[in-house]
Image: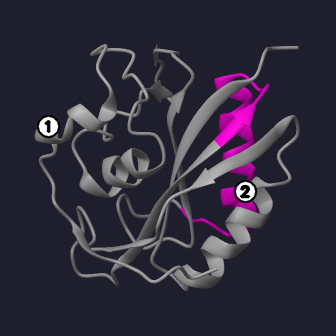
């Protein structure tokens, strides 16, 4: 069994987002050999890609886990399936979207799994919530704390921080 690793996930929804994110958080707490150790604020954000859809709610969480990145991906995809995530329209509306941002200091560049997540430094709705819960986390490719990488953000979609919705 692996040692504990800290993994960071981005969560987003724009179809009944408050309900689906609450359900997602409950399901994340059931992932084997893992426990949630931090949750960011929730942010109202403009859609990216297809703009004619409802606004999103986004946040980040930290999981302490013994799972490998691939095992964690399988668990998060199972949660997306359970919450009826459809993948029929790229960047379209969704009940839930779970993205693995970091998994310890792993660097992977596979067809279906890229760590660190390629959108992390480009999109404020991924980076800002992660900085909120882990500003000193070192980006494994840049060797700098993520809190020092905000100048790389290209897409500013955060509208506002929401009052905590739990």
Disc 1 vs disc 2: Cβ atoms closer than 8 Å?
A: no
Q: Is residue 135 left or right of residue 95?
A: left
Residue 52 colored in magenta in the image: no
Q: 82 and 64: which one is in front?
A: 64
Q: Is residue 80 left or right of residue 33?
A: left
- Residue range in magenta is 63-86
Residue 77 colored in magenta in the image: yes
Q: Which mark is residue 64?
A: none
Q: Quadrant of residue 109?
A: top left
Q: Is residue 67 above or below residue 85?
A: above
Image point (48%, 19%), residue name = 110
Q: Residue 65: x percent and y percent?
A: 75, 31
| Mark with earlier residue (1, 2) | 2
Q: Which residue is mark 2?
A: 79
Q: Is residue 1 above or below residue 121?
A: above
Q: Which residue is mark 1?
A: 152
Q: Is residue 51 left or right of residue 35?
A: left
Task: Give the Cα distance between marks 1 and 2.
Answer: 30 Å
Image point (75%, 51%), residue name = 78
Q: Is residue 1 above or below residue 145?
A: above
Q: Quadrant of residue 72?
A: top right
């Amino acid at each position: 069994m692996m040692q504990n690793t800290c993994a960071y996930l981005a969560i987003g929804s724009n179809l009944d987002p408050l309900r689906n994110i609450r359900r997602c958080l409950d399901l994340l707490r059931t992932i084997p050999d893992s426990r949630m150790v931090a949750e960011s604020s929730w942010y109202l954000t403009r859609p990216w890609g297809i703009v004619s859809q409802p606004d999103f709610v986004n946040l980040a969480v930290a999981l302490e886990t013994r799972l490998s990145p691939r095992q964690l991906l399988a668990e998060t995809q199972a949660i997306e399936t359970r919450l009826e995530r459809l993948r029929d329209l790229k960047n379209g509306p969704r009940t839930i979207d779970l993205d693995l941002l970091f998994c310890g200091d792993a660097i992977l560049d596979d067809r279906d799994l890229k760590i660190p997540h390629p959108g992390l430094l480009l999109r404020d709705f991924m980076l800002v919530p992660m900085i909120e819960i882990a500003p000193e986390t070192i980006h494994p490719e840049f060797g700098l704390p993520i809190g020092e990488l905000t100048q790389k953000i290209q897409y500013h979609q955060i509208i506002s921080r929401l009052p905590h919705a739990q």
